[in-house]
Image (spheres, rainbow, N blue to C red):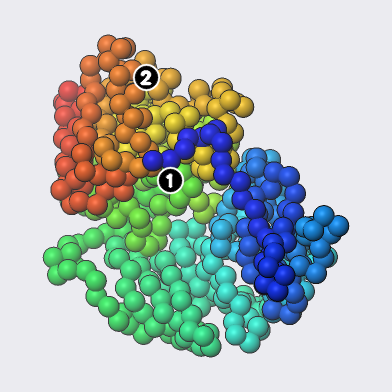
Amino acid sequence: MRTKVGDEQDEASVAFIDLEGDSLIEIDAGEKISPSVLSWSPTADLVLLRGISEDWHDRLFMTASPEERGREGSVSVRIVDRFHDAAWVDGPMFDESGAWMPDGKSIWFVSEPGGWGHLYVASLSGRRTQLTHGEFEVHYAWLDEDHERWFLVTNEGRPGSRRLWSMSLDGSNRSLVTPEPGTYDVVFARDFARAAVLHSRATSPAELYLLDASSGALDGPVTTSTTEVFRSFPWLEPEAVWFTASDGVSVPAHIFKPERYGGTPNGAGVIFIHGAGYLQNVLDGWGFYYREFMFHHFLASRGYTVLNVDYRGSAGYGRDCRTAIYKHMGGRDLDDVVDGARYLVREHGVGAKQVGTYGGSYGGFLTLMAMFKYPKEIAAGSALRSVTDWAHYNHGYTVRILGTPAGDPEAYRRSSPIYFAEGLEGDLLMLHGLRDDNVLAEDILRLSQRLIELGKEDWELSLHPVERHGYRRAASWTDQITRTFKLFQRTLPAGAGGGG
C-alpha cells in the first residue's frame, strides 16, 4: 500500500534539459533539500523553485538559471526567501503559493513569519515585504490581469468564514467584496471582472453563483443541488462558542443544545472530533463533515448536548495553534477535547460521567486517547478508521510532527493509543474499513489484540469489508452512525448503563 514513517524515501532532483545539446543540467538545491519547480520567470531565463528541508524546519523559495552553469556542469540556486520554524513549516496555501510578480524581479507567497498565514512579496535580493496584517489567515490569493489589485480569500473578522476581499498592489485599501457570512470558492474569468463562485452556509451546501468583482453583486444561485426533502427540514446553524481550556487559551466550538432542536435534555453530552489534524470544522459554511452536522441535529433532538471542537492543531487560527501538537499528538489537542467535556459539565447541565466522543481518522485517534487516558471523564467513544500507532502511519504526514521512530521513540510512545490501552474503563466501539489504504486495517487489528491480552471486555470492533479510508457507500455510513448512536443510547443518558 505505502511506506511507513522512517522508511527510506525517494529522493527528488530537478534539472534543465538542454534541447540543442541533448543533455541535462542538474540544479543543485543543496543537501537535504527536496526541490520542486514552480514556474519560469515572465521576463528572464530564470526558474522559480520551492524547497523543503529533510527535517521540515525550512521552506525555501529559490531561483536558478541555465546560463549559470558551474565548472562541474550543474547550476547552483539563489535563495530568495527562507522561512524557518522550530516545529515544522506548513500553513495556509503551503503547497499553492510561490509565483512570480509580473516584473520578474520579485515573487509572492503566503507564509507564517509573524505567526499567521499572510501574503508576502520578496525581491530577488531577498527583501521580504508583508502585504496583509492581523490575526487572520490568507487562504487564496490572485493578482488581477492589469496587475493593479489583489483578490484574497481570508477568514478576517470571522474565523469560520472564507470571504473574498480586494486590495491595492501594495496591500492598502483592503475591502470586503462578499460581506455575507459563509464560505466562498472562487474561479475568476480571465479579465477578473467576473467570477464563478461556490457559496455555502452552515445549513446549506455550496451552490453556484456569478460574481461581479467590482460591485460584489452575486447573481444566483445558478444551481440547486439539494433535494426537496433536504430543503423541507428546518436546519439550524449551531451556536458558535469559545470555552477556556486548562492552559487559559480560548478554544472555538459549535454547540448544539437540545432545547433549540426540539429535544429534552437527557443529561448526556457528545463531543465530535474532526479528522486530519490540520483542518477547520467550526465553519460558517457547509463543511467536510456534513453527515456529522446532520447527525448532530438528530442527537440534539434526542436530548444530547453536542460540542464540535476545533482543538489545538486545527487550521484557521494561526501558527501557534497549528504547531501546539509538535512532538506530542494526543497532548494539548486531547486536553482541549477533555476541557470541552468539562465545559459541558460545568455550564450546560451534562452529567460528569455522561460524556461520549466520536470521530474518524485523527478524530478516531483522539477518541481512543480520550477513552484510554481520561476514563473518569469520557464514558463512551466511537473511534472510526483510527490511527492506533503513529509508527505505522505514513512518512510525509508524521515525520514533520514527530520526527522518525528511530530518532525520537519517546514522541511516538506518548502519542500512540496502543501504549495506553490498559486505561480503558468505558464502552468503546471501533469501526474500520478493511481495505483502508491510508490508516491500514492492521492498526485496528493490533489494538484489538492488545485489548484481548489486557482482558478488556467493554469494547467491540466492526469491520466494513469493502470500504477504504474515505467511506463511499451510503449503507456503510448508515451502519457506523447507527452503531454509534446505539452506543451512546446504551451508555450515556441518565439511567443508562454507563450514565450517572
Of the pair 382 and 245, the residue shown nearer to us? 382
Residue found at x 56% / y 22% = 410
Which mark identifies residue 276? 1
Residue receiving disc 2: 421
Instruction: Tell me how far mark 2 sits from mark 1, CA to CA.
Output: 22 Å
**In the foreground, 372 or 340:** 372
Kind of residue sitting beneath label 2: Ala
- What quarter of the picture does the C terminus occupy? top left
Q: Residues within 10 Å of mark 1 (few under 14, many from 20)?
A: some
Whether residue 342 is visible to the viewer of this picture, yes or no, is: no
Residue 390, given in percent of the width and then of the height, sits at 46, 31
Q: Residue at x 65, y 58 (%)?
A: 14
Relative to 98, say whether 330 is above or below: above
Q: Residues within 10 Å of mark 2 (few under 14, many from 20)?
A: many
Q: Quadrant of the N terminus?
A: top left
Give the side of residue 92 with respect to residue 3, left or right. right
Q: Along the horizontal axis of the image, is 240 left or right of 6?
A: left
Residue 290: x percent and y percent? Answer: 29, 55
Question: Looking at the rendering, which quadrant does residue 39 occupy?
Answer: bottom right
* Residue farthest left in this picture: 229
Look at the numbered disc 2 and give the secondary structure of its residue: helix
Instruction: Give the amino acid at mark 1.
Output: Ala
